[in-house]
Image: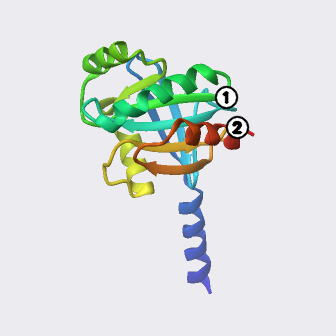
Amino acid sequence: MKKIIISLCLLLNFSLHADEMEMTDTNGTSYKVLAQEDEFKIEGMEGKVVFLEFFGLNCPACKELTPSLIALQKQYPNKLKVMAIEVQNHDIKPIEAYKASHGINYTTFSNYDVGFVVRYIANKAQWKGAIPFLVAIDSKGKVQALKVGLSSKEELEAYITKYSK
């Protein structure tokens, strides 16, 4: 009986454990992240739907998705925060050049500055590296959708409507 109680306590401790991480964007702003179970809470994003987008500078599908993300970030500034992580191992300068040339109005990260976050999500979501990859987080910090591949603007807008409540 004693072994069962100890085992249950250990199991509960592991399931209640939260991972604390930090992400630093290409502008140097840091965000604390608290991840636990199906929650992924990013400091300062409370009350907003977050699209955590894994993309690559050399990814044609990612480039095709970019205009929709730009439009939605502009259309829903109080409901949505797009945060895009470049996962093809480019440094900040090429990412900033890409942002400028594509008119990107959302937050970007280099994989070098958020590696723990990428590994955490890859492990939890069983992500194998295909991009674009979307993690849709609701306004309460709960992961609601994981999607590999292109998403239409309408599909993304439906996520905003559904998860901003």
| Alpha carbon distance from label 2 to label 1 | 7 Å
Pointer 2 with pointer 1, Cβ within 8 A: yes
Q: Which residue is drawn at 41% across and 23% down?
A: 25
Residue 139: image tag = none
Give, as a three-letter code, the residue at label 1.
Answer: Lys
Farthest right residue? 165
At 69% from the left and 43% from the top, the residue drawn is: 162
Q: In the picture, residue 9 is in which quadrant?
A: bottom right
Q: Position of residue 70 (x, y in %)?
A: 49, 23
Q: Mark 1 points at which residue?
A: 79
Residue 41 visible somewhere in the drawing: no
The quadrant the C terminus occupies is top right
Residue at image point 24% right, 32% down: 58
User: Residue 4 location, x and y as percent?
Assistant: 59, 82
Q: In this view, does 83 lie to the left or right of 122?
A: right
Front one among 100 and 135 = 100
- Which residue matches tag 2? 164
Residue 154 in the image: above or below residue 76: below
SS state under label 1: loop
In front here: 153 or 38? 153
Q: What element carries label 2?
A: loop
- How many numbered marks does the figure carry? 2
